[in-house]
Image (spheres, grey):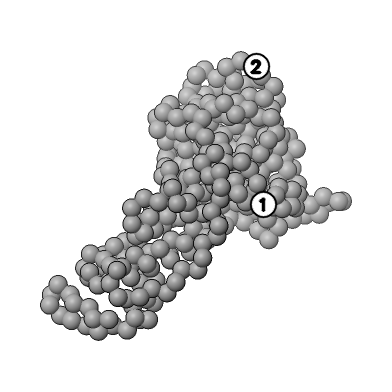
Amino acid sequence: MQVNLRSGNSYYLDGLIVENILLNLAAKELATVSTVCTALRAPAQLAAHRGLVQLANRMQGVLLRHCERGSWVSQLREWESVRNSCVMWLQASAQNMVLVKQGDQRFVKRCADLSGNGNVASMYQRMPIFKPQALNGHGTLEFDGASVLKTRPFAEPLQQPITLVVVARARGDTTIVDSLGPNSSRFELCHGYPSGWHPSPEICMTASGHDSSPRHSLRGSTRGTGDWHVYTAIFDQRRSEVYVDGYCEASGKNVGANVLDGLSIGCDHNGVFFLNGALAEIRLYHCHMPNAQRVQCEAALAARYGIGYSCAPQMPTPPKTTARFSCAPRSSLRASDA
């Protein structure tokens, strides 16, 4: 193809060479190419589309037509930002875990971090049980009210905004995830802190306080009845939001300004309230995840684990292989103060 630059210089580039170069560029670089050279604008967009499909597949997400906004380059930039913000990704799969067999049960000693950041979760006592093919053919971690997994302390405590996505089932007054330990500030997703007693409290998120009841929290309507859900908690002080299976159950209320120093999975940071239920997957992002990426990540998780999802009643068929592009232009009661 003939490339004419603004400087007046002209070059001939072989199409295969151009394709290989563009496929190795990030969204920001593809945007620059589109701006500098009109002849490469269409090839750059096609390269961005292929990169977008590959990135969504690596993140085990889906691309939904009704979530498309802007050019392929701009969508790729948004997905790259979400990928780069992923701090931790745990999945209940045997290949990602170190298991210890005791009798007929296999217990989870260590769970690898798929994000590549090394934030593994482990425990040498009170380990959860691994149940293979327990949820739509996929494994789960079973927590019996005394089990827990903990990460190491993060290199630096994470400031808000933080997005936590969890596939879990919980029953009763129970903690799903909290900050690391007794010296930590609360950073909790739970069914608890009810305004009045109930055997199955509503979903609640809070990043307020330490030992005493939180002054700030955000409470949804889904109760801890033991059903599987995709929970998304976006901790962003007064811009916080909580979603369950795609429904926004609460938003626009301050949850507190605490930071996150690590995760206790299946237990609160004081070691008092444990999870009665199970977990299939946890993802932690150091960002306020945009709606488009949140919906597409949640929808993929719901499809993987066979959970009903409100924003994507019919999942799309897997995308076909993108064609090669042409270079021709074109227990005890907890109470809240809140």
Query: In the rendered image, which residue does mark 1 sit on?
Result: 92
Residue 218 place in picture, x, y as percent: 50, 27
* Residue at figure coordinates x 54%, y 39% from the top left: 310
In this rendering, is residue 134 above or below 210?
A: below
* First of labels 1, 2 by sequence position: 1
> Nearest the camera: 209 or 63?
63
Residue 260 place in picture, x, y as percent: 49, 40
Residue 95 place in picture, x, y as percent: 68, 61
* Residue at figure coordinates x 50%, y 68% from the top left: 321
Residue 51 place in picture, x, y as percent: 43, 65
Task: Tell me the crowding category of disc 2: few under 14, some 14 to 19, or many 20 or more residues within 10 angstroms, Cα based.
Answer: few
**Secondary element at image label 1:** loop
Lateral position of residue 307 relative to residue 11, left or right: right
> Nearest the camera: 65 or 34?
65
Does residue 275 appear in the picture of this structure? no
Lateral position of residue 105 relative to residue 205, left or right: right
Lateral position of residue 278 relative to residue 231, left or right: right
Outermost left residue = 8
> Nearest the camera: 139 or 319?
319
Task: Tell me the crowding category of disc 1: few under 14, some 14 to 19, or many 20 or more residues within 10 angstroms, Cα based.
Answer: many
The quarter of the picture where the N terminus appears is bottom left
Q: How many numbered discs?
A: 2
Location of residue 335 by image quarter: top right
Amino acid marked by disc 2: Trp
Query: In the rendered image, which residue does mark 2 sit on?
Result: 197
Does residue 294 appear in the picture of this structure? yes
Amino acid marked by disc 1: Ala
In this rendering, is residue 105 above or below 191?
A: below
**Secondary element at image label 2:** loop
* Residue at figure coordinates x 12%, y 77% from the top left: 8
Outermost right residue = 103
* Residue at figure coordinates x 51%, y 65% from the top left: 320
